[in-house]
Image: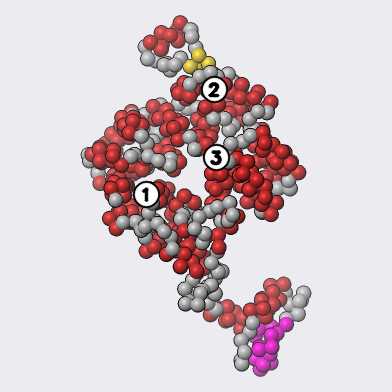
Amino acid sequence: MRSDISSHDLARVKQGMFLGLARQPLAVPDPLQALVSAAPREPSLTVLALAGQRQRFQRPAIERRADNTPEAARRLHQDPRPLLPEAARRILSRLANGVEKALADTVVCAAVRRVVRAGFRPHPFDLPRLIGHIRNDARCLGLAERAYLALAETDVTGKPDAPSLLHAEITAQNWTEFPKAHRVAFLRARRREDRAAALALLQSVFKSEPAAVRADLLAALDVGLGADDLPFLEGLAAERAESVRGIASRLTASVPGTSAYAVRLAEAARCFARNDSSVSTLLKRAGLTNPANVVFTPPKRANLMEQRAALAILFERFSVTEIAAAASLAVSDVIGALPADEETVLTTFSNRAVLDGDEETMVQLVMHRLSHSDGVRFSVGPVMAWLGENLTQPLSPESSNALLRSVAWQATLQRFKEATTPAAMRDDGTLVWTAAVLPAELLASFQELLAPLLATTTRSARDFAEFVRTLETT
């Protein structure tokens, strides 16, 4: 064959094979005419065999500059952040290799977020090990990590470098080129800074996005909802995608200032009230009731399932601050009045605190849960994991000491001391996530608390604590 088959001709051959030769006759490219006529078989089979061999040995085309270097590789090394110091790097590698498989993704992400907050970036040689854990967490991905993802994607698909992964940072000018998770996080952050500007950004691209992306971007408006969002939300009543219509409807019902919102808020606030009866006063003096003497009286339904469903609708999107203000109570009074098993309202308050970035309320809610848990029948691990995944800064020394002194945490420590089976000795996340939320100055005393436990129980927690201490001192 004197000349190579063009990509256009090859695409036409593939398209003909996919559609079926009965629908579209095979157009044999000129360079293959001689081979096809010389082969003692059906021409279409010869062309199929040649096209398959061509694709088998075809190498992916990578966009390169004159010096043969992929653009993504250049961008990876243009990240201005300094590399993670060698001492901390070794501990991070040990943590990633040793942490329980079920906890690996979330714990490694938490460690890399610490690296990012400290102003460093992981070493490029460590990215093959780390990227599988952090690729879905936008908070872990700086320019170097996104460029590495672009290189990895090129190797797998053969597509050229994705521009969305090669920007130094996400801005209002380039945000549409980033992956969906980055865009949603960026839009929520913009809503906290400038609600109107974020709404304008969304409106400018909304119609051009696929339904799945429109739904997730629209959900980002749940931060700072206001009456000026109503025209846009109400205009989506005729939206073709049911997922988008559903989100728009829920957001519309949650806009402050509307009559429906005011009625629902007043009803939710009436669930909390002071109890000034003489019996309650005696119980309060005996330390058997809420010190603020506030009781939670939810609306009654026929059964527990119906009551939980009613509470979910009633408290949807309300923050504990809004409820406290409407009930003329302190936030601590409202939280303290909630029973230990009232997961519906506690979850609603927790979700809203995350959306608002209200870390003080997050900590209060977690401490309330811990105060009502014995740490023996129920693991503290999930509560600590939720806190670690959503805090942007470590706990204050005061909150940290309260956590370590809590009955639930001390009971968990005792349970590990008394464990006699491998399953019971395994850290359920309580210890490693405690290390993840504590400030650096308390990690030495935390490690002392772990001293009586077996090394297999405390390995990941000790590694995380040592990693943070090394990182902070650097």
Q: Quadrant of residue 82?
A: bottom left
Identity of the amino acid at label 3?
Answer: Arg
Question: Which residue extends farthest top?
Answer: 278
**Rendered residue at 34%/39% (across/down):** 438
Callout 2 crowding tier (Cα within 10 Å): few <14, some 14–19, many ≥20: few
- Would you name the residue on which mark 1 appears? 118
**Rendered residue at 36%/34% (across/down):** 396
- Would you name the residue on which mark 3 appears? 192
In whole angstroms, how far apart are the C-alphas of marks 1 and 2? 37 Å
Instruction: Describe the element under mark 1 as helix, strand or loop.
Output: loop
Q: From what the image shows, is residue 296 above or below residue 434?
A: above
In whole angstroms, how far apart are the C-alphas of marks 1 and 3? 23 Å
Please report contact status of discs 1 and 3: CB closer than 8 Å, yes or no.
no
- Would you name the residue on which mark 2 appears? 325
Which sits earlier in the primary sequence, circle 1 or circle 3?
1
From the viewer's perspective, tell me whether residue 306 is left or right of residue 374: right
Residue 48 appears anywhere in the view: no
Callout 1 crowding tier (Cα within 10 Å): few <14, some 14–19, many ≥20: some
Q: From what the image shows, is residue 103 above or below residue 80?
A: above
Which sits earlier in the primary sequence, circle 3 or circle 2?
3
Instruction: Describe the element under mark 2 as helix, strand or loop.
Output: helix
Q: Quadrant of residue 51?
A: bottom right
Where is residue 304 drawn, in percent x and y?
56, 26
* Magenta-colored span: 27-49
Residue placed most toward the observer, 443 or 73? 73
Queried whether the magenta region covers residue 45, the answer comes back as yes
Where is residue 90 drawn, in percent x and y?
30, 57
Identity of the amino acid at label 2?
Answer: Ala
Please report contact status of discs 3 and 2: CB closer than 8 Å, yes or no.
no
Where is residue 115 drawn, in percent x and y?
37, 51
**Rendered residue at 48%/21% (across/down):** 330
Identity of the amino acid at label 1?
Answer: Ala
